[in-house]
Image: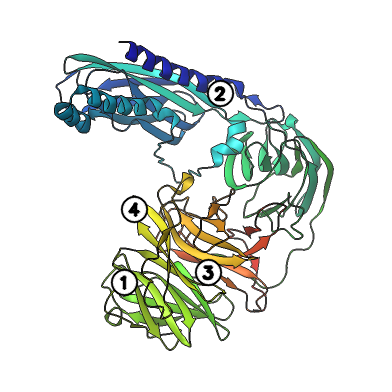
């Protein structure tokens, strides 16, 4: 009985701590006040039956209704149940919804079932070990509300938004929603539901210092000082009469985030967000240019970056004419924008049906290979990285190893010949040709390795060693590295090192590896999350050895989606025709609502020095607005 009491006390203490932390971290947005029309909600929960026999699965229906006109954001509904002398464990104990609109209902079922493992152990080895297993299963259900295990039903669930502006504008509220009881194997079980959600805090026009009222185009500069418990930034295209409508370029130093939001009646709609290394209380120069249909915004937070890329370049429009600053600011300057770039431009996406793109530059011509053909691989050619022409099939199924699922081709020139590394049937194949346009012919009747592997990438180090980076399946997708023999058609025995373990936003997936070497540091870039996800993105890690260990960049992902382009993932790197600019070539979802067929995109990237650690790999993107053509084209 004492064990029951102590466990319940632990759970109560944990829940109390979370509630206290929430209460002690109120929202502060330069004096912003919480809206008074906090959503009112009703909740019911009931099991399908009032009594269950041992071994039956228990299904509980929970209905949550938002009875107000205001939206509930980041709604999280969790279940925990009272300890019993049964082998019950929880099934789905957590549910997440981005937005529960006013007047709408969330209808969700939860389940409990027997822990067959604990029951088997108890029958075989006795009750003590079974009780230990049962206890940890029950403890997991208690801790589940504090361990993010969520299901998103929205296409706009950018994982790090709650860590940025949302955390300040919309603090989390935690409430006990209700409970239900039933009998299982003669014992009464009580299930308790906990509800958490965010109520947006509005920003009133009085919290903005107006810099001026004028038509576009204009440029707004300021030095802002974001504090630990508030955000600061630039307001543009705004209407600051009775409410705050317009655009907001914001900095949050506590969460190391910056972003662009569209404000409606003082409440933000998130458009894009990125990592930004910021220190609370320090001052930063910021700039934006707005022409009525596009905003370009800079954050000058790295003095070693002599010519920084704009942090945001988005096609957005607002009706207002007010511009200003929010939070502590000085040296505010509102003036005419400089003349727009008037040279030739390109806009993403560039070429259709180009998943998992790889680009080879040979004799002044770019060759594009991609996952695009069920009977092998087709290719396209370009002289400027922008305008592509289909050159037809370069590898046919009958000429290479594999029968289906032809993915992720990469082509390398080596000793005067061209080697195609590709995936088929979840294995790696190699084919060779005398021209980058093929035809590629198998080098063997067997795959490169017996073990299942995808997304092969070859890296030639400057010491003459050749490495093959692949993705293996092991409760998810993990990146490995092998030594490749000089013939490029076999892997050295005894080699093979596991490099990555997916974590955080990556879910269970690290894939699409590519390697760069810069100033003696190896940059292993990769894609994280499921390729069908809105959040599919490019990240990187660094090491002083091609075989690791690698350390993740703290600002990952380096190339992430926003409200205008989704699924920005699997990629490679190449240079402009004159060799002066580096580009990342990557695919994106076909549209904001359709994944396939994926499309081709290019954006500029560069290495930027910093005071401590290896240089940063920085991307100017993703972009969907007009960009200058690659240099030399």
The image quarter containing residue 632 is bottom right
The image's mark for residue 474 is: 4
Q: Quadrant of the C terminus?
A: bottom right
Indicate which disc, 2 or 1, sits on the residue closer to the N terminus: 2
The image's mark for residue 357 is: none
Describe the element under mark 4 as helix, strand or loop.
Answer: loop
Instruction: Report the residue marked by disc 2.
Output: 22
> In the image, what residue occupies the spot 59% across and 67% down?
517
Q: Position of residue 528 (x, y in %)?
A: 46, 53
Q: Marks 1/4: CA distance?
A: 26 Å
Mark closer to the observer (2, 1): 2
| Frontmost residue, 124 versus 225 | 124
Q: Where is residue 320 in the image (x, y as percent from the top left)?
A: 70, 43
Q: Marks 2/1: CA distance?
A: 53 Å
| Frontmost residue, 263 versus 325 | 325
The image quarter containing residue 356 is bottom left
The image's mark for residue 374 is: 1
Graded by Cα atoms within 10 Å as few (under 14), some (14 to 19) or many (20 or more), the crowding at tag 4 reads: few
Instruction: Report the residue marked by disc 3.
Output: 350
The image quarter containing residue 270 is top right
């Amino acid at each position: 009985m004492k064990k029951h009491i102590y466990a319940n006390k632990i759970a109560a203490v944990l829940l109390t701590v979370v509630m206290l932390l929430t209460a002690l971290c109120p929202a502060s947005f330069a004096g912003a006040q919480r809206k008074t029309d906090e959503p009112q909600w009703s909740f019911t929960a009931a099991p399908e039956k009032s009594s269950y026999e041992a071994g039956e699965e228990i299904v509980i229906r929970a209905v949550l209704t938002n009875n107000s006109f205001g939206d509930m954001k980041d709604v999280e509904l969790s279940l925990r149940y009272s300890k019993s002398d049964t082998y019950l464990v929880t099934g789905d104990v957590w549910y997440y919804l981005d937005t529960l609109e006013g007047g709408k209902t969330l209808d969700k079922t939860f389940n409990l079932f027997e822990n067959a493992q604990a029951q088997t152990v108890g029958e075989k080895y006795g009750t003590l070990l079974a009780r230990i297993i049962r206890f940890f299963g029950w403890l997991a259900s208690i801790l589940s509300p504090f361990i993010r295990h969520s299901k998103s039903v929205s296409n706009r669930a950018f994982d790090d938004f709650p860590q940025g502006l949302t955390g300040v504008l919309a603090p989390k509220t935690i409430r006990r929603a209700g409970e239900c009881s039933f009998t299982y194997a003669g014992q009464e079980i009580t299930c308790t539901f906990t509800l958490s959600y965010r109520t947006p805090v509005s920003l009133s026009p009085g919290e903005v210092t107006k810099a001026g009222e004028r038509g576009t185009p204009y440029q707004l500069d300021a030095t802002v000082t974001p504090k630990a418990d508030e955000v600061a930034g630039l307001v543009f295209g705004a209407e600051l009469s009775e409410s705050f409508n317009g655009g907001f370029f914001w900095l949050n130093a506590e969460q190391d985030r910056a972003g662009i939001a569209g404000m409606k009646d003082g409440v933000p709609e998130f458009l894009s967000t990125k990592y930004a290394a910021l220190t609370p209380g320090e001052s930063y120069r910021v700039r934006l240019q707005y022409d009525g249909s596009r905003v370009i915004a800079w954050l000058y937070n790295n003095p070693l970056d002599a010519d920084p890329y704009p942090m945001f370049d988005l096609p957005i429009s607002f009706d207002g004419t007010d511009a200003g600053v929010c939070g502590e600011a000085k040296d505010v300057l509102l003036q005419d924008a400089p003349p727009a770039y008037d040279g030739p431009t390109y806009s993403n996406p560039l070429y259709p049906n180009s998943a998992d793109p790889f680009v080879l530059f040979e004799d002044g011509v770019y060759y594009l290979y991609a996952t695009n053909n069920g009977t092998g691989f087709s290719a396209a050619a370009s002289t400027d990285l922008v305008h592509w022409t289909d050159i037809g099939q370069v590898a046919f199924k009958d000429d290479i190893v594999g029968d289906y699922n032809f993915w992720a081709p990469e082509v390398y020139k080596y000793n005067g010949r061209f080697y195609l590394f590709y995936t088929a049937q979840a294995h790696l194949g190699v084919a060779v040709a005398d021209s980058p346009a093929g035809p590629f012919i198998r080098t063997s009747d067997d795959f490169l390795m017996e073990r299942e592997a995808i997304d092969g990438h070859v890296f030639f180090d400057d010491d003459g060693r050749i490495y093959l980076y692949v993705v293996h399946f092991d409760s998810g997708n993990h990146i490995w590295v092998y030594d490749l023999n000089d013939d490029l058609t076999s892997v050295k025995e005894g080699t093979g090192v596991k490099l990555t373990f997916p974590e955080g936003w990556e879910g269970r997936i690290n894939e699409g590896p590519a390697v760069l070497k810069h100033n003696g540091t190896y940059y292993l870039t990769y894609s994280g999350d499921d390729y069908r996800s809105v959040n599919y993105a490019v990240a990187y890690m660094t090491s002083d050895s091609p075989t690791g260990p690698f350390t993740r960049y703290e600002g990952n992902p380096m190339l992430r989606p926003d409200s205008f382009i989704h699924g920005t993932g699997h990629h490679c790197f190449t240079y402009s025709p004159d060799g002066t600019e580096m580009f990342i070539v990557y695919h994106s979802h076909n549209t904001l609502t359709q994944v396939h067929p994926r499309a081709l995109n290019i954006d500029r990237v560069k290495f930027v020095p910093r005071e401590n650690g290896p240089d940063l790999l920085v991307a100017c993107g993703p972009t969907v607005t007009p960009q200058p053509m690659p240099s030399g084209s």
